[in-house]
């Protein structure tokens, strides 16, 4: 996965979320749960690491903004 940049977590309320899940549906369900509570920059695909079980999904959230803004 790409490097986390300082701008992604520059102030309190900004976060990088990485989900490790058994499958795509579970990873995207977690993303949707958080999207209902705060503003996110959603991911559109999961990543698979060779030799590692399951999938990973990384997205960014901002607790200061409301969902859909």
Image: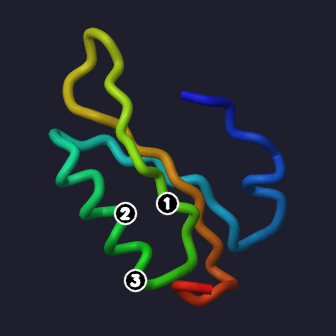
Gap between marks 2 and 1 measured at Cα: 7 Å
Left or right of 44 on screen, residue 22 = left
Residue 63 x/y as whole percent = 62, 79
Extreme residue in the top direction: 51
Locate the N terminus and report the quarter of the image it occupies: top right
Name the mark nearer the viewer: 2 or 1. 1
Task: Please identify, in this view, whether the residue under mark 3 or under mark 1 is nearer the observer.
Answer: 1
Q: Name the side, left or right, on which 42 lies relative to 34.
A: right
Q: Residues within 10 Å of mark 2 (few under 14, many from 20)?
A: many
Quarter occupied by residue 62: bottom right
Residue depicted at 52% across the width and 85% down the height: 67
Tell me the number on the disc at residue 31: 2
Q: CA distance from mark 3 to mark 1?
A: 12 Å
Reply above or below: 52 against 56.
above
Along the viewing direction, whichever of 11 and 56 lies nearer the viewer: 56
Is disc 2 in contact with disc 1, using a CB cutoff of under 8 Å? Answer: yes
User: Who's the residue at 26% across and 10% down the image?
Assistant: 51
Label 1 sits on residue: 42
Of callouts 2 and 1, which one flags the residue occurring earlier in the amino acid sequence? Answer: 2
Looking at the rendered structure, the secondary structure element under dot 1 is loop
Q: Is residue 55 above or below residue 44?
A: above
| Cα gap from disc 3 to disc 2, whole angstroms | 9 Å
The answer to which image quadrant residue 15 occupies is bottom right
Residue 10, x across and y down, in percent: 83, 58
Asked where in the image residue 60 lies, by quadrant, the reply is: bottom right
Q: Secondary structure at mark 2?
A: helix
First in residue order: circle 3 vs circle 1: 3
Contact check, label 3 and label 1, Cβ < 8 Å: no
Considering every residue shown, the one lying at the far front of the view is 44
Residue occupied by mark 3: 36
């Amino acid at each position: 996965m790409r490097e986390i940049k300082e701008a992604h977590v520059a102030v309190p309320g900004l976060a990088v979320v990485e989900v490790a899940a058994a499958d795509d549906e579970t990873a995207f369900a977690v993303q949707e749960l958080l999207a209902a509570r705060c503003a996110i920059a959603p991911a559109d695909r999961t990543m698979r690491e060779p030799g590692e079980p399951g999938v990973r999904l990384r997205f960014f959230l901002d607790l200061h903004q409301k969902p859909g803004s």
